[in-house]
Structure formats: structure tokens, C-alpha cells
Amino acid sequence: MNAEHLMVALPTTPDTSLPSQAVAWLRRGRAQVQGVLASYGLVLFGPRGWAALALALSTFLQPERGLLGLLGLLSARRVATWFAPATRAHDLDWLGCNGLLTGLILALFFQPSPALAAVVVAAALLATLSAVALRPLADRYLGVPLLSLPFVLAGWLALLAARRFSELQPVVAVATVEPTWLPSLMIPLLRSLGAVFLQPTTAAGALVLLGLASWSRWAAVLAVLGFFSGWAMYTLLGGPRTDLEQHLLGFNAILCAIAMGGVFVVLSPGSLVLAALSAALATLMGSAMLSAFAPLDLPVLAAPFIAVTDALLLAMMHRLGGGPLQLVQGMPGRPEDNLGYVLQHARRYPPAGTALLYLPVLGRWTVTQGPNGQPTHQGLWSHAWDFEIADDGGHRWRNAGTELHDFYAFGAPVVAPADGRVARAVGHLEDNPIGHVDIAHNFGNAVVLAHAGGVFSALCHLQQGSLLVREGDVVVRGQVVGRVGNSGRSPVPHLHVQLQSSADVGAPTLPGEFLQFIRSAPEGRRYETHGSPDTGDVVEAVQGDDAVRRALALPPGSSWTWQVQGSGLPERETWRSTLDGLGRRQLQSLDCAAGLYMDDAYATVLDYAGPADRLLALFALGAARVPFLGDGSVSWVDSPSGLPFMSPLARAGVELVLPFTGSGAVQTESRLRVAAEGIVVETLVRAEGSLARRLPERIELVLRPDVGPVVLRAFRGQQRVVLAQLTTDNDSEVTR
Amino acid sequence: MNRQSYEKPTILKHQAALANKFGRSPGARALERIDGQKVTDLARQFGSPLFVFSEHRVRRAYREAYRAFSQRYPKVQFAWSYKTNYLDAICRIFHEEGSWAEVVSEHELNMAKRLGIPDSHILFNGPHKPLEALESALLAGTHVHVDHFEELYACERIAKKAGRVLGVTLRVNMDVGIYPRWDRFGFNLDNGEAMDAARRIASGGHLRLDGLHSHIGTYITDPTAYGRMAGKLSELALAVRRETGMVVKSLDVGGGFASRATLHAQYTPGTDATPPIDDYAEAISRAILGAGFAAGELPTLFLETGRALIDDAGFLITSVVGSKRLADGSRALIIDAGVNVLFTSYWYRHDVLPAEDRGGMLEDTVVYGPLCMNIDVVRPSVMLPPLEVGDLLVVRPVGAYNVTQSMQFIRLRPAVVLIGEDGQIDVIRRAEELDDLKNAESLPERLAAR
């Protein structure tokens, strides 16, 4: 998400005075212009702003063509509001993009005339209608993007229809003179780039490359890679070189490479290979289509790109294993951003598709056998945990340790690790004397809970007669279901926990992770949002702290106005907490925004977009992750992306090597203390290279329950470099 | 070869069993070291009498109690009872371990604040809270435990004046089968007074009922009494929720757990009579978890345990200043510490052990303190070997209440040292000097020396 986009989203206050109406008009006009530019950008997967302007300019090198393209674009956007069921900004941009291409293709084949303009408007309507008709089908049955298919269909129909009308004059082919100083391979490359906007000239291509590269360096690299891969394939097979540009084959290779290399597939060394392969494939597909369409004398347009991209995407969606290639989830953006998101998410948040549980016990426990542990967590039953309690001296029992009651764990409550329903409940088996096992009933007394998503959790070796639930009962997380016992194959009292895919006691295990726990590490007690404790780890459930939760509620609609002292930062900043239609939380300030996530256990800043020298940027680092716990002896680490805090040049450099190095993170270590001034979250920031000189070494964020952040301090060494305080004039706005 | 010292031949009654009906036979004849430090060295270095605290034992006791409660209840918060022992170093250890502060007077409140405890981590108890202290505490967000209606009204006036809704906790008393009933503190639950107070809070509109607190007594060796109390407190919280809509966020079950000390009145030694802390934890948490709180409205469990956490960590080193035969022929020892620094000896049958085992026959002995008062008896009867003037004795457990309740009656108060976990010994309170006692006084001009 970039800054221009945010400006549009800012809520406008209703004000009817004349100047403000003018401002509102200007703002609407500005939004319109940005939407039009976004339609240009979408042709190449999304450049906006200046980059999109360069792309738009490439169509105006022959102004009449550019105008016809714009006419198609505006017609499509206009009729979209009449016909399209949803007119979200992004959908509108996409429809506009198809209208633009429809206009451009007609302008490429016919001489400009009022009649052509009428056909452009009609064809744009056709493109929008086909988009409206096909989109639900594609979404429902295939799940792949339609890309520029509406343009291809409308384009073909318009070209076929136009032959019957004498008012439309075909363009007389004029041999364009290309600069002689260009290396010979650059000419077809640039012409193919220009052909993306149906302007197969080197000048247009240069503008397209400029726009593309200013948006994303990797997109530009992929474009070049795609072209040469397609070109190599075609020339190797002895295909006529001119086909690549004249029959628009080259641009299909370019689009395929960008799409598969970084837009729909996460950028990686593997995706570069995929990009080259798909570009080669696109030229083959294009040749096949050329032959097939020869009787109709139709250009292939973007059909090879669409066919190859969607076929590959479909194939990847239905893979069984993950493989080295990863599909981009959600709305695709810049290749660099897609990769950055994936890297950051993998570093900081639970992996998608992993079953997540809370600890099924209270207090501090030792994992005496973790996943793949000896002797019993093996093979089909490898993903399981055994929990026991040890005292401060490491002993698991008091007295002689010969009686069940000597063991600290014996009789401790076992709680539901997530909401669910009791699928099995066995509670009649006798507890073994210490040292004895019951191998006839390996899992002993057990409660198996069915959770959402078809995951079951099994809590085993429970105490005879301790079950508080029956089969069919609905349980909520944290509800006591029974007590730790010594039934089944259990020589000493302990709790065996496993995830499985069926309700049967003793079913094979599924991998999973625990949420929200504290792990005792050599460096102290460490909070972890998610993780899988291993044999020997000492873990404890987090005791939630309501005051911290209330201090980080940041309710949507609230705002905080800051008085800031610090070199380079604006003197005043107002943060607004917003909530979008999808439920995403955000803090917005001047020209920057921080995405938020919070549940009942922790709050985190998902990402930050905007200039580095903003107070909100410091908040994004200082509150990268805050668990709702009030225990000052617990620390936690995080690794938010450092990219938003780098200089543009440094960022571009890091992004270029990101697929190979895969980091770009800032390391933070935080702890929290309750002081007279409020709840203080102290974060140590460790960055490398030039980033270390740009970022403070320590950030202190003071929070108050029901108010939110009230003070932010940043330090380099012992020197305070930033002091921001909530201004008093908006206290009433925040305090309820 | 060392010549062994001559020992008079003695005849001792053979004891076959580990214990008879008077309890376990004395297991140790002497206590030579505390946390690895020689008692004789400590006395030589810091004088006698001398209070000695073991940091290791403090932390171990806290962790044991925290483990017992936290493995049974999801939200547990201990608050260190300042009145039990408010030496800064001791308080700091508890705070380091995660304890909040429980105070019963404004000077204890200020002690906690001086140690950097935020207002929101202090529980302010007691039947008398001066108005200024009450006002500043309430406004600062301290957890104020209201004891009676007059105090409740005062809180309402304070909230009204401030124009804010302030949270309070109600101290509640009830019958749980423990005698004496501590019904002088707080609002009675059984006759409906506590519910009336809750209704008053709800209808007044100035206060918010954040918590309920009960403290059933002291040295309670019956965990089921706590179960009954926690159950009744939970019922009250749920009734308040039903009737007024106010969600009670915390239940404070107070303290009163027994330590391992043996009371004069006890039949079996404290080590046997006192239930493990797990039993208290089990009774309390089972009662609250089973009370029927809605998911997400389970209250935080506050504990104000004092004695059970600190008693075992405190020792008193004292020295023999004289020995005599009483008129009835029984043996008596006079030592340099008496009830002036051992308030608990009225109640506890303390262990009194020599610092060195030099053999000799154990003889029933009365141990007197140094005061010229007939009441100054440390142990009316204890089996001790022959001891000479200057020999050291160790009295244990003395961690709870003795430091805070000791007085400058006849003698000034002794020094207190802390043995750290790494064996480092620090003086955490020096022996008092005359000026400590006299500085607060002023002599009227007319009586001043001519």
C-alpha cells in the first residue's frame, strides 16, 4: 500500500463552506486521476503514481492512439458503475484497464476517425460486459484471475466486426525507423515492451521500461528475462524473428515472466526459473494460436499470456506438496512487496495451515518428551508433547516420590486448548501405581476434542474419575475438562497432548503449534506468540493482563495528536485508528500508515508504509509486538521488516538481493514494566548497515489503559533523540 | 592427634520410634550453618543478637506457592503483605519474583511507592485509612479495599468530587467454620450486608466494584475453610453480576496460611500439622473454577500470603548471657534476645538450637530473654545440652512479624543481615543506636539542662 492510496482512503469531514467544497471537488478530481493512472498501471500488474504516468505517456507518443485508449478506459470505468455488481476501486481499475487495451488495439489497427471512436466505446462496453459475466464463473470454478481476457475477447470481436465496415480504415503499415545506435537485441526488447501497451516502438518501450523499473526493479528484470527467454526459445526453434514483435509474441513472454516470476508467485531463485520457462511456453502457445487463428487473420493479443499464466496458476493451486515455489496469497502487489510480506510473515507469525492450540495446562510445565522425542513420540505418533511439573530445584515430586500424590503434576487441572466439542471421553481407567504401566490401554483416560477445521486434540493419561465433561459437550478454551493422572502407558503422572485428524483415541498425530506461552530460556523467560516446545523446554501459559489489553485497544475512530521533539520529525502528528471493510485495523498519520492486528492475547504492528522519519514509524518498531502480560521479567523478540525505514536507494539495493539473502529485518527485543507514568514497553532495536545509523537504539512507549500511547521516547545510547507527548487538547477525544 | 574433650558419662532414654505422641524427637542437636554460612562467623562479624534472612529460602517459598496456585488457576497474583516483614530488601525480593504490594497503612503505602511499585500494583487494606491517604490512593488507581460503609461513602464523595467512576474492592467477612470469626473486618456476607454494599455501589453511580476480598483468619491449618470462603466469595461475585451487571474482576482470598512453625497449643509439630501449600491452592482454585464464571469473566485470584512465605527464611542468632538453676531445681538460660524482638514467642514453640554440637546430655531448660520482666520467656521448656556464657543459639523460624513487631523496650533492636543466593552477606538493617530512638523526641526548654 503506498501513500497515494492512503490519501484517498482518508475520511472526509462534511463541511459545506465554499472553499472546502472546492477542496472536496479537487480531492474527488485527484481520486479520479489516480484511478485512471491505476488502470494504466494494472496492465503491468500495478504501478501507480509517477510510474503509471510514464506508462500512460508511452501510449501518447502517437497522441490519437493515446486518446482512443483513454476513451476506452474512461468508457469502461463509466459503464462499470452501471453494470458491474461491485465497484470497489480495484475492480474499477481492472475494468478500466481492459477498456484501455481495447481502445489501444483498435487504434493500432484502424485509422482514427469518429466512427472508430464509436467502435472503441462499444468495444469497451463489450469488454466490461464480458468481464462482469466471466468474473463470477472464474472466481467460483477456477479461482484464477481473468487478467486481460475481457480485452482479448472484446478485441477479437471488434476486429472481426470492423472488417465489414467501410468507415473504418485499416492503418497502412509504415516502416518505423529505429535508432541505429541501439544494440541489435535492444530493439526487439523495447518494441515488445512497447507492445504491452500496443505501441510496438522503441520509444514507447523505453517509456514502459522506465515506468516499470521505477515501480519495481524486479519487475523490470523479469521483463527482460522473459523477453530473452522467449526470444531464445523462438530463435532456437528457427521461428521468424519478426513474429516476436509484429505478432505481439514478445510481450506475452514479458507479461508471463513478470506474472510467474514475482506477482503471482513469490520471488525466489525458483520463481526466476519458472519465469523463464513460462515465457518460453508463452511463445510456443503464441505460435500455436497464430497458426490456429491464421484463417481468421486475428492477432493473438494477450491470449497466450492469459492461457499460460492461468494454466500454471491452476496447476500450482492444486499441488499437493508445497515445493520451493510459493503462491502469493491475497492481493498481489510489487514482486518485492510480495516477497517482503511472505518473509516477514514467516518470521513473525504462525504459518498458515498449521493447527494452533493454547497450552492445555496452567502454570509452568516441563516438556519431558516433545515431538519426535524418545522413546514413544515416534513414527505416526511423533507430533506429541508430554508435560510434567518440576519445582524450583528441578524435582518432579515431593517426599519420596513413591505415591501418585507426591508428584506435582498429579491432579493438576487440564484445560481445553481451544474451543470445541467433546468427541470422546474415557475416564474409568485406573491410575497406575508409580512405575507401572497399562499397555492394554496405551492412552489411558482421555478427552478428545473436536475443533474447527477438522482438527482434534487428545489429552491423555487423565486421572480416573476426574473428567468434568461428557461426549457431545461444548467446551470453551480454558475450561477444565479433567485432571492429570497416571492411567494408560504412563509410569509417572504426566499429560500427553497430541493433535490428530480423527476422534479416535490413539489416532496418528498431526503437526501443530502452541499459542501464547512463555519459554524459559538461558537469557530469561521469553514470551512466544507461537511455537512448538521441545523436549526439556520449560513453558508456562501467559496470564493475560487486562490493563495492557485496554492500553492497546486503540479503538477505531479514536485519534491521538502528538507534540514531537526530535530531529527530522514533523512537530505535530495525528494518528487515526481506522477499520476497513475487511476488518483490517490501521493507524494512519500524515502520509504513512501502520497495519495492526490484535486479539485477546497480543497486539502487533503488521507492517508500516510511509517515510522513515515519522513518529508512527517509531511506534511501528516500538510496538512491533506487545503481549498482554504484566510480568516485567518476561521479554520477547521480534523481527519486523527494516525495508520501510531504509533510504530509497538502500531499500532498492536490499530488495534486489532479497530473493537470495531473504532477510531485511530489524531485530527487536522488548520487555514491559508498569511504572507510575503508565505501562512502559521498552524495545531495543538492532539493525545492520546503514539502517543502524538511521534507527534509534531504544524506544520507550508509555501506554495507559483506555487511552493508548501517551509518551514515546527514542534513544541513541544514553541520549534521548525523540520525545513525543500526547497533546492535552485532544485528551477528551481519546478518553472515554 | 587432637585430644577429645572430656564428656561426663550420661544415661539417655532409648527412643525407638521416629515420633511419640509429643511429636518427633529432636532431629538435630545443633544448627551450625545457615545457607552454608557458619553461625559462629556470622555472630562474630555482625554481633549478637542478629536476625539472619536467607534469600534462597524466600525465593524458594514464593516459587513453591506460585507454582501451586498457577498450575491450578489461570490468573494468579500474589501481593506481598508488608506488615509481615517490610524490610526493603525482603520486599524487593518478593517484587522481583512478581509480587505486588499489600499495605495496611499510609506509611506502608509510601514504603511500597519508594520501592517503585506503581499505584496500580498496590492493594490498600485495613479498617483505618485517613481521608487524605484514601483520596490520593483512590485517585492514583491503588486497589482500595473498603472496610465499612463510612469508608464507602467517603470513596463515593471522592469519586464525585473528581468526576470519575473509581474502582473499589469490598472486604467481606463470613462464617466458614473457623473460629474466631474475623467478622470485625469488612461487610458481612451471611446477613446480606456485603450484597447491600454492592447494590449501593451500583446505584450510587460513582464507584465500580472491581473486586471482593476476604481474610478468614490467621494460621488456618484447614484448607477446606478456604475452599468454602472462595466458593462463597464466587457466589457473591456472580450474584453481583446477575443483579447489578458489574463484573467482579478479582477475588482476593487474603492470607492466613500456616507456616511450618509449631504453636504452643499444637499437638504435632508444625512440619507435620501444616498442610502443603498445594492443598490450599487446590481448595481455593477448585472452588472458583467450579463456581460457574462465564468464559472471559474468570476473576484474577489475589493472594496476600505473608507468614507462609517468609517465616522459614528468618533466623535469630542469640548468645547465652547466663545460666542458673531455678528454685525448683530446673535449669534456666538467659539469652540476649527476648520477647522485645521475638514477639512470636508468645505463640510459637520456636526451635532453639545450639550453634555447635559439643555433645553433652540434653536437659529440659527454660530459656529467658534479657528483659527484667517476668513475661520474657522464649521457651518455657526445651531440651538443650550444657551451654556456657557466650555460646550461640539459633532460634527459628522467625521470618514473619518479628522484625515489624519488635520494639525498643529495654533494649535497642538488633541488626538484620541477608544471605544472598551466591553466599554474599549484606547488612539490610544495622543495629539501632540511641539516636534512632531519641531523635524523634524534643526536650522542652524549661526542662533542658541548666
Image: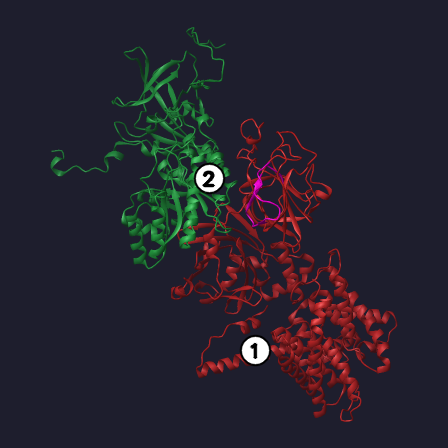
Chain colours: A red, B green
Q: Is B129 or B335 nearer to us in this picture?
A: B129
Callout 1: helix, strand or loop?
helix
Q: Residue at x 29, y 52 (%)?
A: B153
Residue kind at label 2, given as amino acid type: Ile
Q: Quadrant of residue B226?
A: top left
A120 left or right of B259?
A: right
Specify whether residue A475 is painted magenta.
yes
Residue kind at label 1, given as amino acid type: Ala
Residue B360 position, x and y percent, is: 42, 11
Looking at the picture, does residue B256 appear above or below residue A637? above
Crowding near the residue tagged with mark 2, few <14, some 14–19, many ≥20 C-alpha atoms within 10 Å:
many
Give the main secondary structure of the magenta stretch. loop
Structural distance between the alpha carbons of marks 1 and 2: 63 Å
- Part of the protein shown in magenta: A459-483
Q: Is residue A62 visible?
A: no
B134 left or right of A361?
A: left
Q: Chain of mark 1?
A: A
Q: Residue lying furthest right in this view?
A: A238
Q: Is A205 or A86 nearer to us in this picture?
A: A86
Residue identifier under label 1: A31
Residue B7 position, x and y percent, is: 42, 8
Specify whether residue A210 is painted magenta.
no
Crowding near the residue tagged with mark 1, few <14, some 14–19, many ≥20 C-alpha atoms within 10 Å:
some
Q: Residue at x 46, y 30 (%)?
A: B275
Q: Is residue B331 visible?
A: yes
Residue identifier under label 2: B284
Callout 2: helix, strand or loop?
helix
Closer to us: mark 1 or mark 2? 2
Looking at the picture, does residue B15 appear above or below residue B434? above
